[in-house]
Every structure is written in structure tokens, then in C-alpha cells.
Amino acid sequence: MTLAPVVTLPLLGMVSPLPGFPEFRDYVLVTADGDGLLFWLQSLDAGGPRFLAIAPARYFPDYDPVLPQPALAELGIDPARAQLFCLVTVPAEGPAAATANLRAPIVVDPATWRATQVVLPDSRHPIRRPLRR
């Protein structure tokens, strides 16, 4: 009998809940495509939310936001170590019209897997940037 390999998933502990989802703080980050281009940010709570997310550097090489100091302090992280994920919206028109929210990235400390969503104070990064160019 061959045993399946054990897969460990990062458990993200949100230091502040995502806006609109105050009762959900524990999530796992699961690859949605096997290539590391798409991820599911899935709540561990039964009936909790699941969000489609991307690592923005894979889609937008010029994306280099200045993260707010209070968020970095809350996570206890140097901005150079932070991993970023952006939530994706797929509208009724379908995947070709999908957009990423670059204004409010999820900031993750890969050493502790603590995370928070930040809203960037400037309008340099759009709320809805198309994934396709």
C-alpha cells in the first residue's frame, strides 16, 4: 500500500479580520492551478469565505507598493521579507475580465504566517487592475 505524501499548507492567522468578514481569522493558502499563479485563500471555518488570490509580482513586475508602517509593526516584519497577495474578482463576464485589487494587498510574514490586509494610502495602485493586458 502506497501512502500519499503529507502536504502542509500555510495557516495564515489574520491579525485583523478581512473587511466584511470579522468572525473569520484563520485561513489556508492553497495553490489553485499547480503553477503558483493562482491561489485560494480559504477560511478554516465551516461555511467561511474563500477568495481567489495572486502573487502580484508574477502578473505585475512593476508592482512595488510602500507598505504602511503600522501594518508592518503589527506583523513585526521588515518590508523586504513580506510576501504579498492580491485578491481577484472574476465578474459575470468571465475570467477574461478578471481584475486584481492592487490597492489592498494581503501582507504575509512567511516566518510566522501572520497576515493582514492593508489599504494603501495613495491612489497609485488601482482597486481593479485587469489581469490580462
Image (spheres, rainbow, N blue to C red):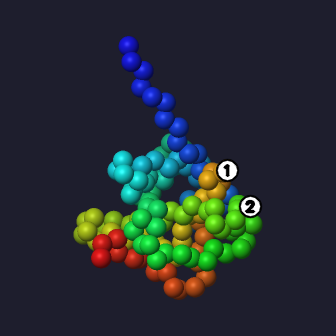
Residue 65 occupies quadrant: bottom right
Residue 88 in picture, x, y percent from top left: 41, 65
Q: Which numbered marker is on residue 92?
A: none
Q: How many marks?
A: 2
Q: Check the image and report above or below for 13 versus 101.
A: above
Instruction: Name the residue that disc number 2 marks.
Output: 76
In depth, the one of 92 and 79 nearer the eye is 79
10 Å crowding of disc 2: few (<14), some (14-19), many (20+): few
Query: Badge 1 is on which residue?
Result: 112
The residue positioned 70% from the left and 62% from the top of the image is 77
Q: Is residue 95 above or below residue 35?
A: below
Q: Quadrant of the N terminus?
A: top left
Q: Is residue 94 visible?
A: yes
Position in image of residue 19 (x %, y %): 57, 66
Disc 2 from disc 1: Cα separation = 10 Å
Residue 17 placement, left or right of 74: left
Residue flagged by tag 1: what amino acid is it? Thr
Q: Quadrant of residue 99?
A: bottom left
Type of amino acid under label 2: Gly
Looking at the rendered structure, the secondary structure element under dot 1 is loop
Residue 14 seen in the current view: no
In this rendered view, identify the residue nearer to me: 39 or 3. 3
The local crowd at label 1, few if under 14, some if 14 to 19, many if 20 or more residues have their Cα within 10 Å, is some
| Quadrant assignment for the C terminus | bottom left
- The residue drawn where x is 25% and y is 65% is 94
Identify whether 77 is placed above or below 69: above
